[in-house]
């Protein structure tokens, strides 16, 4: 026992760059992905981590000082830097909760399938990191790894149920049969969308409003690309920071580079996890395919192609920036995650039945709440990032308007502020949802057999 | 040399997974070295499609595309994969 503890202590002491390749290799070998492939996979994740730190270095040395000058010049309060979801993914994967997340989530999925509390075989192993991210924040705040793991599990159960519930709507809107999207980010917004949609339905007159957005994507699509968002924002920040023309143009190219490169580094995480993801997919598919009405859980990326999703997201980019300046209490400057707003709308669009007006209303509410959540969670995210081996410059607070603004993550963190009582409440909530889903599934199955 | 465009939401996540599987299938069918796969974002398909022989997408592509588009979600789910592979091989033969 002593030797094992010493071994784990030694590995953790090596830092995330070395620890993650070792752990990913071990998990890969255990899941039967082969020794050579697993080691290569582990190293790929390590490369991604080093790459992410390099790009954040550019961010820290060029973009952050300019943004600070802008804030000082204009008396803004947006001092927290949105470094984007890849940072959240790195926190999740580099933390103790992330180490065990794949086997844990596979087990949760299997238990839910056996107990009929879900219809989804979730093969989107990569996105388990969203659950690990919630768990990592809870672990950081409570110092209790068990609480962290419970938070991750509760988060997954809620998302699995919402994935089941929204699958028929997705099929209607995007024509994708047999697929659900139990995605830690996308699916977290479904309760809010259901609620707002219900309220608008009740308001006479307003419930008839719609905005046709068909042409927006065609005409302005290029504006939504990371390279364009980054460069334009860089130039604006440069001007507002009172830099020289040379400095302004330089900053445009640098921020464009940051927005393009950060997700590319995250792609290396994804690539590294592929062999493990493939092995897990095969394992779970072999055992759980021939059972009633089933869904396969995929990455919500497959739903992005909907033209309304892309159009609404495009319109909300400037809205997010304006909100960031005028919203009282917000301290986050939206940057890197502006290009992942489409992921928020993949399930909102089917819920509001493709209505452009309602989608924009839901989007504005989500963004406003998201900015406040991202502000609130920023200290925890920053300390988690540092604990995961991230190089955050001194005096800089980081957040993300995507995962750092996730309402479900925030609620899970709030639960855990009440110690054991909060944990029990969260577990009860998850169990209640799971049982409700079980009733729904059994009812549906009975109707199918009639 | 067949030029294949692989489109997904970010040009990163699902297209990376499909890229691995598609390459494996094509190599097994004896097309090794006879194709080049480029990943892109769904928004870029419209502009880039003219330069490619065909496109495999993991999400719905709407609007005018100048090359044949194959929906490649089956590469992720494994369901109905044979049909999609047959479509891809059809395009490779052209």
Image (tube, coloured by chain):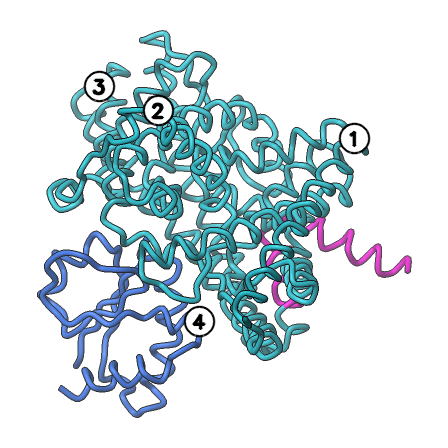
Query: Mark 3 or mark 2, which is nearer the start of the sequence?
Result: 2
Closer mark to the observer between disc 2 and disc 3:
2
Label 1: element kind: helix
Give the blue chain's letter: B
* A102 versus A290 height, above or below: above
Q: Please give the residue where the numbered disc 2 appears in the rendered image.
A: A203
Q: Quadrant of the N terminus of chain A?
A: bottom right
Label 3: element kind: helix
Between the C-alphas of marks 4 and 2, the distance is 41 Å
Q: Please give the residue where the numbered disc 3 appears in the rendered image.
A: A239
Q: Where residue A178 sits in the image (x, y, percent)? A: 43, 66
Q: Please give the residue where the numbered disc 4 appears in the rendered image.
A: B77
Q: Are marks 4 and 3 on the same chain?
A: no
Crowd rating for badge 1 (residues with CA inside 10 Å; few <14, some 14–19, many 20+): few
* A329 versus A133 height, above or below: above
Q: Please give the residue where the numbered disc 1 appears in the rendered image.
A: A419
- Residue shown at 65% from the left, 63% from the top: A116
């Amino acid at each position: 026992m002593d030797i094992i503890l010493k071994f784990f202590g030694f590995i953790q002491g090596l830092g995330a760059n070395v620890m993650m390749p070792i752990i990913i290799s071990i998990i890969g070998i255990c899941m039967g992905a082969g020794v050579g492939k697993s080691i290569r996979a582990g190293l790929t994740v390590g490369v991604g981590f080093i790459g992410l730190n390099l790009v954040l270095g550019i961010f820290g040395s060029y973009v952050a000082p300019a943004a600070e000058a802008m804030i000082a010049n204009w008396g803004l309060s947006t001092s927290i830097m949105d470094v984007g979801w890849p940072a959240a993914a790195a926190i999740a994967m580099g933390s103790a909760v992330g180490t065990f997340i794949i086997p844990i989530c596979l087990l949760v999925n299997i238990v839910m399938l056996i107990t009929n509390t879900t219809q989804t075989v979730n093969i989107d192993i990569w996105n388990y990191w969203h659950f690990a991210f919630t768990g990592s924040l809870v672990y950081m705040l409570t110092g209790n790894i068990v609480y962290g793991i419970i938070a991750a599990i509760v988060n997954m159960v809620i998302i699995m149920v919402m994935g089941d519930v929204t699958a028929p709507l997705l099929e209607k809107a995007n024509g994708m049969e047999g697929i659900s999207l139990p995605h830690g980010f996308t699916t977290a917004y479904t309760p809010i969308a259901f609620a707002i949609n219900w309220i608008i339905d009740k308001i006479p007159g307003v419930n008839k409003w719609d905005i046709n957005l068909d042409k927006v994507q065609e005409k302005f699509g290029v504006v939504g690309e990371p390279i364009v968002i980054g460069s334009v924002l860089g130039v604006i920040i440069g001007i507002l920071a009172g830099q020289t023309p040379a400095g302004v143009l330089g900053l445009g190219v640098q921020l464009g580079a940051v927005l393009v490169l950060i997700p590319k580094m995250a792609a290396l995480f994804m690539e590294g996890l592929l062999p493990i993801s493939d092995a897990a997919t095969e394992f779970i598919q072999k055992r759980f395919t021939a059972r009633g009405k089933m869904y396969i859980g995929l990455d919500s990326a497959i739903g992005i192609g909907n033209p309304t999703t892309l159009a609404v997201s495009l319109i909300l980019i400037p809205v997010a920036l304006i909100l960031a300046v005028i919203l009282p209490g917000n301290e986050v400057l939206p940057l890197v995650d502006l290009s992942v707003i489409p992921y928020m709308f993949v399930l909102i669009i089917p819920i509001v039945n493709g209505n452009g007006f309602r989608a924009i209303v839901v989007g504005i509410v989500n963004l406003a709440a998201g900015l406040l959540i991202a502000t609130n969670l920023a200290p925890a995210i920053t300390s988690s990032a540092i604990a995961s081996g991230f190089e955050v410059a001194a005096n800089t607070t980081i957040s993300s308007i995507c995962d750092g603004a996730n309402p479900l993550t925030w609620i899970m963190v709030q639960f855990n502020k009440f110690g054991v009582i909060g944990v029990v409440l969260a577990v009860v909530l998850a169990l209640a949802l799971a049982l409700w889903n079980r009733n729904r599934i059994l009812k549906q199955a009975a109707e199918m057999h009639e | 040399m067949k030029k294949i465009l692989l489109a997904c939401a970010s040009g990163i996540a699902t297209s990376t997974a499909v890229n691995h599987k598609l390459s494996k299938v094509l190599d097994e069918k004896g097309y090794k070295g006879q194709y080049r796969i480029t990943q892109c974002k769904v928004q870029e398909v419209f502009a880039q499609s003219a330069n490619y022989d065909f496109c495999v997408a993991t999400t719905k592509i709407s609007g005018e595309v100048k090359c044949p588009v194959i929906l490649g979600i089956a590469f992720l789910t494994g369901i109905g994969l044979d049909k999609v592979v047959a479509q891809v091989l059809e395009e490779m033969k052209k």
